[in-house]
Amino acid sequence: MAGQADGSPPAADLYGLLAELLSFPGPDLARAVQSGEIRGAVEHMLGHVPLGDALAPLEALGPMEVAPQDIEAEYIRLFDVPDGTPTPLYTGVYAPRRRDAMEELLRIYRHFGLTIESSAHDLPDFVPTVLEFLRILTVGQAAGEPSARPAFEAAKADVLERHLRPWAEQTAKRLGERSGHPFYQGIVAVVVTLAVAELTALGRVRVTR
């Protein structure tokens, strides 16, 4: 995503890390899971985010034995070529009309002067893209002028409530039904935890079934 802001509040760092972890896994991911590095980083960031009653099963993030090829194969099985109930990495699949959801996200991105890089070949509702945008909004919310803060907060609440949280809750449920790898179940559970905590802080939390 082009036009990124700078800064690193803990929640912004966590959005950025989650975006990386839900992108196609690189060769270093398995090592970081084995060593407990991923769990340590997530635990540290969550420790600086007001969570209320929200909890995430951090033990699923490591340390655990896992081979790089197993992580890659599981990512492909779960998110690219599902062998069961689909669990795609696109938030719009859970909207009443995916096209409308993607158009809404594009309008919000453009309102903040952001574009999707053409070289990325990603759609606006690709989950890592949505998470990266939330990172940028969180930086703006913390560092922007007080007069601009309501716009960042309103956009953040809308993206969380209408796009990320429905995807995360549905995906968490489906991954459980599909016996997804504990690591990816854990990462999606962290997304749910963060979305609920942030919406609560923004006064937009609601109970979903």
Image: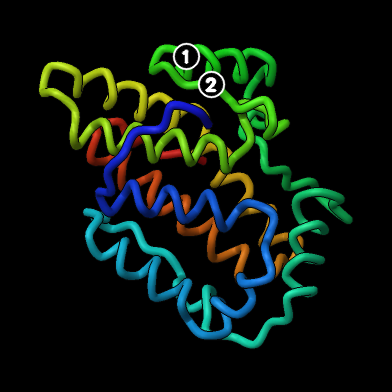
Disc 2 crowd rating (10 Å Cα; few below 14, some 14-19, many 20+) is some
For marks 2 and 1 on the same chain, the one whose residue lies earlier in the sequence: 1
Q: Which residue is mark 1?
A: 110
The crowd level at tag 1 (other Cα within 10 Å; few <14, some 14-19, many 20+) is few
Q: Quarter-wise, where is residue 90 in the image? A: top right
Above or below residue 75? Residue 154 is above
Q: Position of residue 4 (x, y in %)?
A: 41, 32
Name the kind of residue labelled 2 in the image.
Thr
The numbered dot on residue 115 is: 2
Q: What residue sits 41% from the left and 36% below the top?
A: 134
**Which quadrant holds residue 78?**
bottom right
Residue drawn 19% across and 24% down? 149
Front residue of this view, candidates 201 and 137: 137
Q: Is residue 195 left or right of residue 166?
A: left
**Where is residue 59 shown, x and y percent of the image?**
48, 78
Q: Are marks 2 and 1 in contact (CB under 8 Å)?
A: yes
Residue drawn at 30 percent across, 37 percent down: 138
Q: Is residue 20 above or below residue 36?
A: above
Identify the secondary structure beneath mark 2. Answer: loop
